[in-house]
Every structure is written in C-alpha cells, then in structure tokens.
Amino acid sequence: MGARGRFVKLLIDENLPVVIVELARRQEIEASSVRDELPGAPDLKILERLQSTGETLVTRDIRFANHVLEQIATGKPLGGAILIREQKMADMRKAWERWLENPRTPRGIVVLTTKTMRFREYPGQRTNR
C-alpha cells in the first residue's frame, strides 16, 4: 500500500457509483464497497461494521452521515464520514477527485461538493493530516 492510503480505510455506501471505489483504489487507498460486501444491509449493520473496522463511511445519505457524527460525539470509535453532496455522476467524480488529492481520515465529517471541501470535527477529535 502506498503512503497516501496508509491511514485511510473507506467503506463506500451502495448509494454511490462503483467509480468512487475504483478511484480510491487507484490511489492505493483501502476501499470496500457495501454493494459488494453487505448488499442491502440496514444502516445499523453498516454502523456495526464501521465500529469494528475503523473504516470511514463515504455516502450521499445525509441522514446516515449525521448518525455517524452523533455516534462520534458520544465517543464511539468511528473513523468519520465523507458526505458527497452532488447528484450528477460527473460532479460526484469531480468532488471525490478533489478529496483524493489529499486523503485523510476525518474525526467528524467532510462535506464534498465540486466547489468546496468542508471539515467539521468534534472537540477532542483529531484528523490525520
């Protein structure tokens, strides 16, 4: 594994296109897909996996991303969430490629659009930079 992906482990939600997983892997980032490993799983099952593996959730589901944040705020051992807020495939890809330029595990949430990348961390949490 390359230096870029050493600290980042991702679990890509099934509401995102396969290209998101492929782009992460091209950058030598460890990326798993809910679509491949937990197809149709409820959020609770995915959350249990995130707690046991330390993976960061990548999703378009703002409700699920907020649930992960609530768990982090209560001290649960989670890697955070990356929320891609674009609807069109080309825009999702562009936003994701911006994050891939400097990947890091959030201890909160990263909100990605084609124009912005906002980090929101909880007190006492640190991002691997």
Image (cartoon, rainbow, N blue to C red):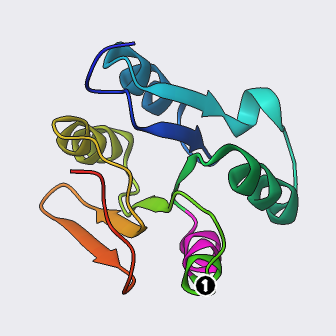
Residue 45 spot, x, y in % from top left: 87, 56
Residue 77 visible in the shown view: yes
Q: Residues within 10 Å of mark 1 (few under 14, many from 20)?
A: some
Magenta residues, as a range? 61-69
Q: Place residue 53 in its image quadrant.
A: top right
Q: Is residue 54 magenta?
A: no
The single residue placed furthest to the left in the displayed view is 115
Work out whether 44 lies above or below 18: below
Disc 1 is placed on an element classified as helix
Residue 89 spot, x, y in % from top left: 38, 40
Name the residue tied to disc 1: 70
Give left or right: position of 23 versus 117: right
Amino acid at the residue labelled 1: Glu
Q: Quadrant location of the N terminus?
A: top left
Residue depicted at x 58% and y 66%: 61
Residue depicted at x 61% and y 72%: 68
Residue depicted at x 76% and y 26%: 36
Which is more toward the observer, 128 or 89?
Answer: 128
Of helix, strand and loop, which mostly describes the magenta segment? helix
Q: Place residue 85 in its image quadrant.
A: bottom left
Residue 121 spot, x, y in % from top left: 34, 77
Q: How many marks?
A: 1
Work out whether 74 lies above or below 89: below
Q: Is residue 65 magenta?
A: yes
Residue 23 spot, x, y in % from top left: 37, 23
Give left or right: position of 80 versus 47: left
Residue depicted at x 25% and y 60%: 113
Residue 14 visible in the shown view: no
